[in-house]
């Protein structure tokens, strides 16, 4: 039986497991240009009106612990739970402590085919005080489009595609097949709102699930200033400035305290009209740049 569901609105947060909360706090405030606060043993990082977009919790994996997806209402969360159960997926209910720590009205969670915890929530807490991002002119591009995107490694790409699209209801944006030293590497890009992709899958086995996370800023100068801050602060560059062919994003990639990459991008395209969008396969990750 195939039933479609379309209730996920955005990627609302990431929970990162790391023993480097102190480094993350400095990185978030002094490099990324966000706000950070301690809440018990958690570090919460805020970039917009949401109470936080990243939680750093203690643990040694230095990887993604959970991906937080937001639906529009408690009713939509119940619909999603019924849908997941009908698909044979084991659904867990968040505890009172988990809901309080995530600052959401309700929370269910499942595991993706490679074991990543996917938290699906509704009714997130919005802060009345404006966020301060003095290093980021114009702030981050977030709102109803989520905080940005993630690229996940998937040893079994077909199973991961099936889960994200046929179970969770992501829509296909496009593909990239890049030949790396004679071996084709497959990337699949998926969206849930006008942001070109909210989740990208890389068909690669990897000891960690998160390849990179991305945040989006308003213009080229803000990207350039972030590159300058990385240089000034001795933060290692993974990939220099370049442009992706599919989302047309200008971006660069830097190291984070957990050693996965952060992409800072802007100036890309959005999927404004689903009915006219045409899926394509690009033969390279970058139109130009993104060199080591
Ligand atoms: Fe990316």
Image (spheres, rainbow, N blue to C red):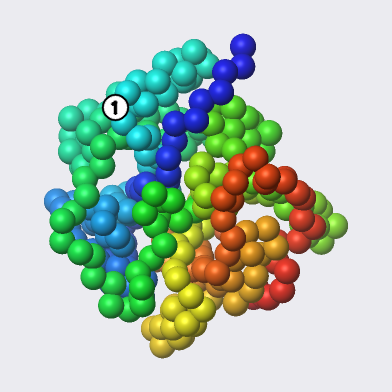
Task: Determine the quadrant in which ligand 1 lies.
Answer: bottom right
Quadrant in which the C terminus appears: bottom right
| 278 in relation to 244, above or below | above
The structure residue drawn at horizontal position 64% and vertical position 73%, both measured from the top left corner, is 242
* Residue 188 visible in the displayed image: no
Asked whether residue 250 appears in the rendered view, the answer is yes
Q: Position of residue 228 (x, y in %)?
A: 45, 86
Q: Relative to residue 9, is residue 88 depicted above or below?
A: above
Q: Position of residue 112 (x, y in %)?
A: 51, 32
Could you tell me how many numbered marks the image carries?
1
Residue 11: give x, y in percent of width and height: 42, 46
Task: Write the residue at 50% across / 45% down.
Answer: 193
- 260 to the left or right of 189: left
Task: Say if 165 sits above or below 127 in the image.
Answer: above
Q: Residues within 10 Å of mark 1 (few under 14, many from 20)?
A: some
What element does badge 1 sit on? helix
The answer to which of 167 and 63 lies nearer the viewer is 167
Residue furthest to the right in view is 182
Would you name the residue on which mark 1 appears? 74
Q: Residue at x 62, y 11 (%)?
A: 1
Q: Nearer the viewer, residue 19 or 242?
A: 242
Q: Nearer the viewer, residue 253 or 33?
A: 33
* Residue at the (39%, 57%) spot, across then down: 142
Q: Quadrant of residue 157?
A: top right
Q: Say whether residue 246 is left or right of residue 40.
A: right
- Ligand 1 closer than 8 Å to label 1 CB: no
């Amino acid at each position: 039986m195939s039933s479609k569901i379309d209730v996920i609105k955005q990627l609302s947060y990431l929970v990162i497991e790391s023993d480097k909360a102190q480094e993350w706090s400095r990185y978030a405030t002094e490099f990324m240009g966000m706000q950070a606060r301690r809440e018990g043993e958690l570090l919460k990082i805020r970039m917009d009106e949401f109470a936080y977009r990243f939680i750093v919790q203690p643990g040694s994996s230095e990887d993604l612990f959970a991906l937080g997806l937001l639906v529009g209402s408690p009713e939509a969360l119940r619909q999603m739970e019924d849908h997941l159960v009908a698909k044979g997926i084991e659904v867990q209910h968040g505890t009172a402590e988990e809901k309080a720590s995530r600052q959401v009205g309700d929370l269910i969670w499942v595991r993706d085919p490679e074991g990543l915890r996917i938290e699906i929530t509704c009714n997130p807490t919005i802060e009345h005080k404006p966020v301060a991002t003095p290093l980021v002119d114009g702030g981050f591009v977030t709102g109803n489009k989520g905080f940005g995107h993630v690229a996940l490694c998937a040893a079994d790409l077909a199973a991961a595609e099936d889960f994200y699209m046929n179970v969770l209801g992501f829509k296909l944006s496009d593909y990239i097949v890049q030949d790396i030293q004679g071996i084709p590497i497959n990337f699949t890009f998926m969206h849930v709102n006008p942001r070109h992709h909210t989740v990208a899958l890389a068909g690669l086995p990897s000891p960690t699930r998160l390849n990179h996370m991305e945040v989006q800023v308003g213009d080229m100068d803000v990207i350039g200033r972030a590159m300058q801050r990385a240089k000034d602060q001795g933060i290692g560059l993974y990939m220099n400035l370049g442009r992706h062919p599919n989302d047309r994003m200008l971006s660069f990639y830097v190291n984070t305290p957990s050693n996965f990459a952060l992409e800072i991008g802007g100036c890309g395209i959005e999927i404004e009209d689903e009915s006219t969008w045409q899926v394509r396969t690009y033969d390279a990750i970058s139109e130009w740049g993104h060199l080591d």
